[in-house]
Image (cartoon, coloured by chain):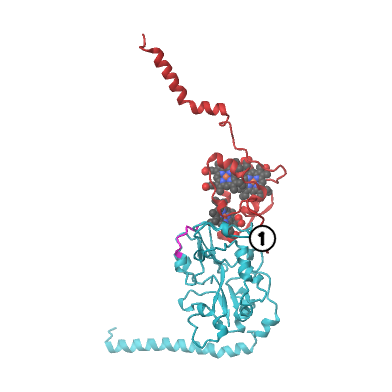
Amino acid sequence: MVTDRRGFLKLAGLTAMTAILGKFTGNAARALAAPLRRASGTESGPEALAGQGLSDKAPKNAKRLAMVVDLEKCRKKAQCRDCIIACHQEHNVPQMTDPKDEVKWIWKEEFSHVFHEQEHEFLQENYRHTPVPLLCNHCEKPACVKVCPTKATWKRESDGIVMMDWHRCIGCRYCMAACPYGSRSFNWRDPRPFIKNLNQEFPTRTRGVVEKCTFCERRLAQGKQPACVQACKAKALIFGDLNDPQSDARKALGAKYSLRRKPGLGTGPKVYYLL
Amino acid sequence: MRIYDAGKIITGLLIFLALVTLPFWFNAVSGKSSHVPDPQIAPDTPRCVRDKDYMKANHMDLLNKWRNQVVRRGERKFMTADGRQFDMSFSRTCLKCHANQQKFCAQCHDYAAVKLYCWDCHVEPGTIKKGSSWR
């Protein structure tokens, strides 16, 4: 077939148009179907969540574990550190005296720092200063895993947890450079002297090793909820399987508007913040 | 045949021989060479997770396997040949039965000049005060 310029341009235009049209019709069909789904009652409203006690057991056969943080509930006790204390006690996370050496698995930061893209001068004052709990996002496409030269960190296929093997970590800190959320800490010095109440059941780390939240992978294996979830009296931390529409996490996400940190980076973070 | 200065040479040789073999004499006299490691196990401890000969030669392999299985594959249960079940844990299984690592593990390791770095992270039982009450 001989194609002249005119013919080629026509063909290219047509292809582009069908592609765009296809995308629009797809979206439109989904938009049209949404109210139907809502009407048929598959999505639950806020009442459903409030009425139902959250589970105190680990999700069973979970495929895509995620954390949902209800900022409204968390904000009511801005000074509360229950989740942090519980997590750091459980995993022997040291309380460093010099902030430069800080090691953290879960911590808090102001809303306007965490969601600085969302911040503007008229943001409600109470939101601006809302403390937001932060932890490893257990990304769908974790950047840290890609850069780790020893496979000391990897994404577990079964449930999507971004795991750590502290035996393999050589302390190169590539993962820390790659993580856009600052979720990883480096042990610049021996952490032992900075652990006040040593939990004998969980090993500490040593100097020259990176550490982070593991979604309490060990507690999950024992059928328990993560330590932070169990410790939160306000029930602001909701843990569950995104693939299970009946899970606490999915119900919570269905009930309120939610944000994730830096979704534009394409890492697919799995910590959701309800507004 | 005669040796010039035989007396001096022979005493010299004898002194030389004595000096060269000094380490052997010294150990024979001090009794240190007869020291063999004596790993101590509390008398009423149940049997090990595998037989003694295997453990003696291959405990480090077993630990390595357990470590990879638990940390990397999430498998935590170990079945012994006689059907007892154990949690594949260094601190919570091995060290429950072998609670005094100084009198057990270290006995052999000091002898064989093996230095375990495991204790940098895994809590050596008895060295640090009782853990948390939070659970």
* Residue at x-position 27% and y-position 87%: A5
Residue furthest top in the image: B1
- The chain drawn in cyan is A
A173 in the magenta segment: yes
- The chain drawn in red is B
Looking at the rendered image, the quarter that the C terminus of chain A falls into is bottom right
Image spot of residue A78 (x, y percent): 61, 77
Which three-letter amino acid code belongs to the residue tagged 1? Ser
Image spot of residue A102 (x, y percent): 52, 65
The part of the chain drawn in magenta is A168-174
Looking at the rendered image, the quarter that the N terminus of chain A falls into is bottom left
Relative to residue B132, is residue A245 depicted above or below? below
- Asked if residue A234 lies left or right of residue A213, the reply is right
B38 in the magenta segment: no
Image spot of residue A135 (x, y percent): 55, 71
Q: Quadrant of residue B10?
A: top left
- Asked if residue A232 lies left or right of residue A114, the reply is right
Of B32 and A271, the residue lying toward us: B32
Of A62 and B117, the residue lying toward us: B117
Q: Chain of mark 1?
A: B
* Residue at x-position 45% and y-position 87%: A22
Label 1 sits on a secondary structure element that is: loop
Which residue is denoted by mark 1 in the rendering?
B132
